[in-house]
Image: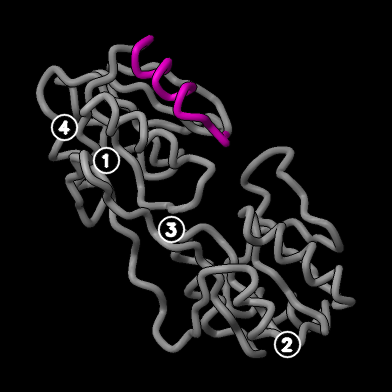
Amino acid sequence: MRVLILGGTREARELAAALLARGDAPVTSLAGATPEPRRPPGETTVGALATPQDLARLASATAADAVVDATHPFAEEISALAAHAPVPVLRLHRPPWRERPGDDWRRVPTLNAAATQIPTGARVLLTTGRRGLEAFAPIGHAWFLIRTITPPGPPLPAHHELLLDRGPYTPADERALIDRHAIDVIVTKDSGGEATEAKLQAAREKRLPVIVVDRPKPPPGVPTVATVQEALARLK
């Protein structure tokens, strides 16, 4: 079976490896937004997909029997494209995080809504990625430690420090970061997964509030699974 995986996540890499192991032929499509991405086993292609026609051409060129959308849960545009793939499509998105006793979460629907929740004088660890940071640019009453994998473009908040780093992180890493920069608020997207969950444990231990941006609604009509094993069963 030839499976076109829209990738970039750990789940996409694990799915490609599992498909190869059972004798299938995965092809992983990477957008190319991150320099030196972690490449999965098997064949890969690199390049942004901007239209349904782009995806249809790629599916045809790779002779795909199915498409698996294993992109980031906030990759709305590519997920919308995947919903219109010319072959059967499956969505593989890891489950969202769940609050635990001791958490102080303030859920919001968008980055703009998150920006309105920043207290005056706060020192903020901002971990929402390099896109959408313009929502925080007008805020002059707080200081931001902006952690991204690649440098974000302007506009950015007037008072900020940029930290280029890539997970996974440990709770000890995150506690040390919070202490070093005297962080008192964390802003994050509900990405799910283990690679960046440690900041939530650190916030719980430090009794810090966390502003959590909820996931966008998925395209209707696309079957969704939460694990690689579920995806393998459906593809089989």
Gap in Å between the C-alphas at discs 2 and 3? 27 Å
Q: Secondary structure at mark 3?
A: loop
**Place of residue 236 in the rendered image (x, y in percent of width and height, measured from the top left):** 73, 87
User: Residue 118 shows which numbered tag?
Assistant: 4
Would you name the residue on which mark 3 appears?
Answer: 74
SS type, badge 4: loop
What mark, if any, has residue 236 been given in the picture? 2
Q: Residue furthest left?
A: 120
Q: Residue at x 71, y 57 (%)?
A: 13
| Residue sitting nearer the eye, 31 or 231 | 231
Amino acid type indicated by mark 1: Ala
Going from N to C along the chain, the mark reached first, 2 or 4, is 4
In the rendered image, residue 80 lying in the magenta stretch gets the answer no
The residue shown at (22%, 41%) is 103
The disc, 4 or 1, on the residue closer to the chain's N-terminal end is 4
- In three-dimensional space, the C-alpha distance between marks 2 and 4, rounded to whole angstroms, equals 47 Å
In the image, residue 205 sits, relative to residue 178, either above or below, namely below
The answer to the question of whether label 3 and label 4 lie on touching residues, with beta carbons closer than 8 A, is no
Mark 1 highlights which residue? 135
Q: 132 or 6, which is in the foreground?
A: 6
Amino acid beneath label 2: Lys
Query: Relative to 151, does residue 26 appear above or below in the rendering?
Result: below
Q: CA distance from mark 4 to mark 1?
A: 11 Å
Say whether marks 1 and 2 touch (CB < 8 Å): no
Which badge, 2 or 3, is on the more N-terminal residue?
A: 3
Q: From mark 3 to mark 4, how far is it between C-alphas? A: 22 Å
Q: Quadrant of residue 233?
A: bottom right
First to last magenta residue range = 167-180
Q: Mark 4: which amino acid?
A: Ile
Category of crowding for the residue at label 3, using alpha-carbon neighbours closer than 10 angstroms: few (below 14), some (14–19), many (at least 20): some
